[in-house]
Structure formats: C-alpha cells, structure tokens
Image: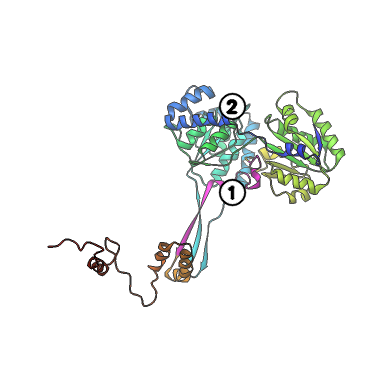
Amino acid sequence: MRIVASSNRRAVAQLLSPTGVRNRETESRAKEIVAGVRRGGDAALRRFASRLDGLSGPIEVTRRTWESEARKLPSAVRAAIARAARHLRSVSRKQVPKGWRHTVAAGITVEQRVVPLSRVGCYVPAGRYPLPSSLLMTAIPARAAGVPEIVVCCPRPDAAVYAAAIEAGADRLFRIGGAHAIAAMAYGTTSVPRVDKIVGPGNRWVSAAKSLVSADCGIDFYAGPTEILIVAATGPARWIAADLIAQAEHDPDARAVFLTWHRRLADRVATEVERQMPATGPARRSLATHGGIIVCRNMREAIELTNQAAAEHVVAGTEAIARLVTNAGAVFVGPWTAQVAGDYAIGSNHVLPTAGAARFRGGLNAADFVKLISVQRLSKKGLKKIGKTVTTLARAEGLDAHARSIDVRLPAPGSPPPRPKGRFGATAPELALRAKAGRLPAGPRS
C-alpha cells in the first residue's frame, strides 16, 4: 500500500478526491431505459427485467413466498437480522421530527405539522450478493416515520432478503433491479405502484436513473463508490489494516485511506495490509488504485484534510479527533468502534452520502421520510400587528397587489369601504365619467 507525504499535494489530491463515477454512456443508456419504462409501462419493464435481470415468471413476489423462503434461513442469521432491526428501530424512532405550535405574538401562531410520506420505494442491491442489511436500513426508518406503504425492489432476492422484508415491515417486493426498477417506482406501472421517494444504494445504473427521475420523484442522494478515512496516531496496525481492506472489498472503485502523523504506524499498517490482503475479490485492485496512507505533519493537518474530503465513513482514533470532524457521513470513534459494525448492528444508518456530499448532508434517517408542513394562523388582532410591516415590504418590492391584499382587510381609519368594480375595472360613477369623456363606450342605447 503506497505511503505519501502530505507535502505531495498532487498525490494527496488523487487519494482524497471522489472517484469519478458519472459516465455519459451509462447516463445516456439509463435515460433510454427510464424513458422506455415511463412510456411503455409493464410491457417495457418486463422486457428490461428479462434481458437485464434474467427474470422469468411474475415480477411481484407473494407474501406466502417471503415466508416460505425465510424459513429456509439458518436460525442464527434470522436472529442476527432481528437484533440489527431492533437497534436500527430504536435509533430511528429518536430521529423522527416533532410537531409543535408556537405563538409568535398575540394573534399570530405557527405550527409545524409532521406528515409521513404516503409510499416509499426501497432499492436493495444484489451485485455479488443480495444485501438484506440495505433493506433494513431503508425500510425501518420509513416505518418508524409512519410511512403506511413500503415497496421493495431487488433483482435477486434470497432467503435473507425475504426475512429482512418481513422484519422491517415491508408491504410489497418486486424482483427487478437497475434503472428499470427505479423508473417503475418513480412513474408507476400496472404492476409497480408509483412512490413518493426512492432510497437505497445501488450501482452506477441505479445512481444514474435516480438522478434522472429526481425532478419527478424524491430520492435520498446520488451515491458513488464507498469511502473510508481512518485518522489516528495510535492503535493496532492489524486492526486498521483490516478496516481498510473491509471497505476495499466492496468495489474496485472503493476508496480506503489512512491519515496519520506517526510514520512508524504508517509503515506497520502498510505491512499489515499486504499480509492480510485476500487472494481473490476486488480489494487488491481497489487499494492499488484508490487506497493509500498519508503521513501528515500533525493532527491539525490530518483533520483539515479529513474535512476537505468529506468522506462517507470517518474512523477517528480518539474522542479529541472525533470532536474536530465536521464533514462526514458518519463518524466511528475509538479502536473498538469497527466501521463494519455500523454497516449492520450499531443502530445508525449505513446509507450515507459519498463523493463529498457529506459537506451538506448526513446519512439517511427517519426525518427523510416525513414532510414538515408549516401551518400559519392570524386573528384580526394579529393581522393588525403585522399589517404595516407586510404592506411596507410588499411595496418596497414593487408588489402592490400583495399590499392591497392586506389593505382590503385593514382599511385606514375613517376611509370608506372599497366599492365593487365593474367589468372595466372601475366603479359605476367612474365608468360614467369615462364614458362622458369618450374613453369608453356609453353602452347600448334604447
């Protein structure tokens, strides 16, 4: 594993810059698929599913099949799914925003109403293996938020996915994946209902399709390859190496970087990575292309680089380091907080922003599945209190009709009530004067 000095700015930028995953050819093809499903409905969806997913038979899986397939799962795996679900449910319930009602001033109130989305679509990848943990991480927060209907799409569900669907409280499950599954959930077909929001990780086809439908359907975020940054000056080298390899095994484009200001630890971690490297799988290629160790001058510089990178996962060696991390999808503190534990069972969500998006948002949580609707109320007394403020600002912006909307409710003291206007936008006496002056026809004569 390569080791670079922080003074080598080009090498540091290469290690910390997000992997470019947006591809014109992929996006162009995804656009054709999305348009095809939107236009052709079920017929197009079945055609793509047959060709790209190898689907034969029905698109939707019956609840009876879920249950029969889930029973085939070893009891230890079912117990692990149940425990992971309990922890995630516990955290998700804490994340649901609260409604409130506030009196701004006498006669002026604002209410925050928390309204769950009506239907949510959860995408569950099945690249090398189906990922039941992703179903838990998307469906459980939605259910905790009060979403009444949860739809799942997975191209190749197995017994673990069915068990997770039951545990998470999903309502329907479809054996479709890729861009065509995203299009079906975004626009609806005869078989697949249209959803309000699509969440969950996926490959570049899924990400491209989510980006394409985002003007018509809510999405969580554009997901790129997974990332981990480990920031530490102490700790067992073999543990740090194991964490780097664990993230690298996801994908050849995965990014795994260790930042330290302790050169000897850097050398020991590099040696351990080589010693632990799997003989097969994408980890070696990932670490050779996108992995490395950056030796910084001090902790301050390591933190600055970490916050610039805004990685998906940041592992902080100590509480002191963790307190200074402001840009991260999730932070894991101390040597015992293995990042992979967060993938499954800590209770926080593993659907996290990548490619620098942690600069402006955190990971998926229950709040992503509700709308915060403001409800405003004024009494006559309340409108009188703010009326002058409103009309002054409206006229300052050149919006006289806005101001008149207040004036009509609050006429100046002693002024007569406004008289109804005729069809030419004037009162009857005004029309008579205009007609006399020849500016309007006087009307039909008898």
Q: Would you place residue 256 above or below residue 297 in this image?
A: above
Residue in the picture at 68% in, 31% down? 253
* Range shown magenta: 352-377
Q: Residues within 10 Å of mark 2 (few under 14, many from 20)?
A: few
Residue 320: image x %, image y %? 78, 51
Residue 429 falls in which quadrant of the image?
bottom left
Kind of element beneath mark 2:
loop
Could you tell whether 154 is left or right of 297 in the image? left
- Residue topped by disc 2: 72
| Percent position of residue 285, x then y | 72, 27
Name the spot of residue 280 as percent of width and height, x first.
Answer: 72, 23
Disc 1: which residue: 93
Tag 1: residue type? Arg
* The one of 442 and 239 positioned closer to us in this rendering: 442
The outermost residue toward the front is 438
> Is 172 situated left or right of 201 in this image?
left
Q: Does residue 185 appear in this view?
A: yes
Whether residue 177 is visible here, answered yes or no, is: no
- Asked whether the beta carbons under mark 2 and mark 1 sit within 8 Å of each other, the answer is no
Earlier along the polypeptide chain: callout 2 or callout 1? 2
Left or right relative to 168: residue 251: right
Q: Is residue 26 left or right of residue 306?
A: left
Q: Residue drawn 47% across and 32% down? A: 35
What amino acid does circle 2 point to? Lys
Circle 1 SS class: helix
Locate the C terminus and report the quarter of the image it occupies.
bottom left
Q: Alpha carbon of mark 2 to alpha carbon of mark 1: how far?
A: 31 Å
Q: Quadrant of residue 136?
A: top right
Is residue 160 depicted above or below 298 in this figure? above
Residue 355 forms part of the magenta stretch: yes
